[in-house]
Image: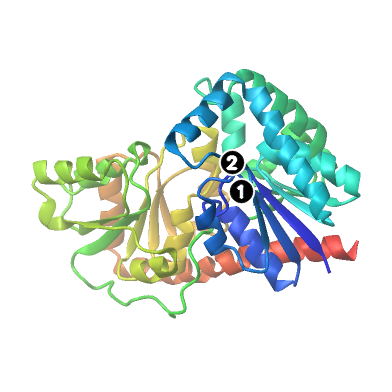
Amino acid sequence: MMRVAVVTDAPFYRDLRARRTVDALARIGADVSVIDQGFEVDKSRVVLEKEYRLYSGAVPPSKSGRFIWHLKNRVLPLRAYDERSQHIYEVLLAENPTVIHCINVFALEPCAKAAEKLDARLVYEAYEYWPEHLHSKTTSIPSSLAEHLEKAEKEIAPTVDAFITVSKPFGDWYRRYLDVVDPAIIFNVNAPDSHSEGVVNNDKNYCLRVVHSGNLFVNRKIEQALYALDETDDFCLAIQGDGPQKSRLKAIAKKNGCSDRVEFIDSVPAEKLIDSLQEFQIGLQLHSPDSMQTDGTVANKIFDYLRAGLAVIAVDTSGMQSLDRIDEFALLIEEATPSAIAQAVDELSSDRGRLSSMRRSALREGARYSREAQMLKIQKIYEGLDAS
């Protein structure tokens, strides 16, 4: 039996990559252990299969303890990193896995050290946030730690047995930056797949139903969709999700006098997300490609829209351009301005046959980007490791 240790520098219950990996490993009958950051351990224990082992780092449960813990990571970053690394290394030696699946550069060094000691295979799954930290002037990572991690990654990544990243643009970047050969592309798909079939046939409705789904953060440009309501009567807007910008967005809708055409919907559980989106016709993605992360990745919501059978209006990015047959299901706009959003909606509203065709294409392509499809990619990686 293959023994796999999944290591993440985040709480397991929050790390959807780790959870997706564990679910895929369960299908091939692997014996799994998880090493995570250790914050809110009870929540991680609930979502992890009972037969699997969870080893959590020592994050103090109290608010004051966590404050001191975070302060130490800021003031003495290398010392704190060494302590976390030693914990991971010791647990790995005790677990004696045949494969170590490392998620995030912050755990790569102890995972590589343990893999060498145990003669285990090493799988490295690189976060899309990390390259941005390397190149951003506003990174929150102390420079001493960033330099240490950069050096470690450059030494270790070319030697791993399998390398995973999140999109084709990031795969190309890692090829150049780390001399990695053929990184596997496994998309961030969080919501489970829907069991319903087909698209809802509502494309003849006069007012198109357009949705923006996801966390309501300041950089999402959702307010531009509210302003677009002033420029066309062809759509009603739903904003699905929660976050710090929700009250501000409600205030904008009220001030602009468009509250009667805007619906605010609370977040829904992941297992109900796809079904909840199927009542709409168009999904919006309005991030600006102003960083490596936002330009090079494909937002989770895109895959949710496709699996729900929605046409997509999105800002043009390298990540979006990397999707196959994108013209069949998406209209790309240069920038998320009210006029660009309104024009794209008008274009689809005036040609309902094209809209219906795009929605059918979205559903077809969505099957390629389903959570199930991503899990099968992981299974294939591990079957290759087992065979070799």
Which residue position holds label 2? 128
Please tell me which of labels 2 and 1 falls first in the chain.
Answer: 2
Q: Write the residue at 90% across / 44% down.
A: 117
Q: Quadrant of residue 145?
A: top right
Q: Secondary structure at mark 2?
A: loop
Q: Mark 1 packing: few (<14 Cα in 10 Å), some, or many (20+)? A: many
**As displayed, is residue 339 above or below residue 138?**
below
Q: Residues within 10 Å of mark 2 (few under 14, many from 20)?
A: some
Look at the image and tell me whether residue 320 can be seen.
Answer: yes
Count of numbered badges drawn on the protein:
2
> Quadrant location of residue 112?
top right
**Circle 1 — which element?**
loop
Residue 172 location (% of width, % of height): 68, 41
Which label is found at residue 47? none
Query: Residue at the spot x=38%, y=52% of the render?
Result: 214
On the picture, is 257 further left or further right than 295? Answer: left
97 relative to 132 in the view: left or right: right
Q: Position of residue 166 (x, y in %)?
A: 61, 49
Q: Nearer the viewer, mark 2 or mark 1?
A: 2
Of the pair 383 and 312, the residue shown nearer to us: 383
Quarter of the image where the C terminus is located:
bottom right
Alpha carbon separation for disc pair 2 and 1: 9 Å
Q: Nearer the viewer, residue 22 or 61?
A: 61
Q: Nearer the viewer, residue 130 or 108?
A: 108
Residue type at mark 1 is Ser
Give percent across and percent down for residue 219.
37, 37
Residue, disc 1: 167
User: Residue 347: where, in percent of width, then height?
Assistant: 30, 56
Q: Are marks 2 and 1 in contact (CB under 8 Å)?
A: yes
Q: Which quarter of the image is occupied by the N terminus?
A: bottom right
- Up-down relation of residue 220 to residue 323 (above or below): above
Mark 2 is on which residue type? Glu
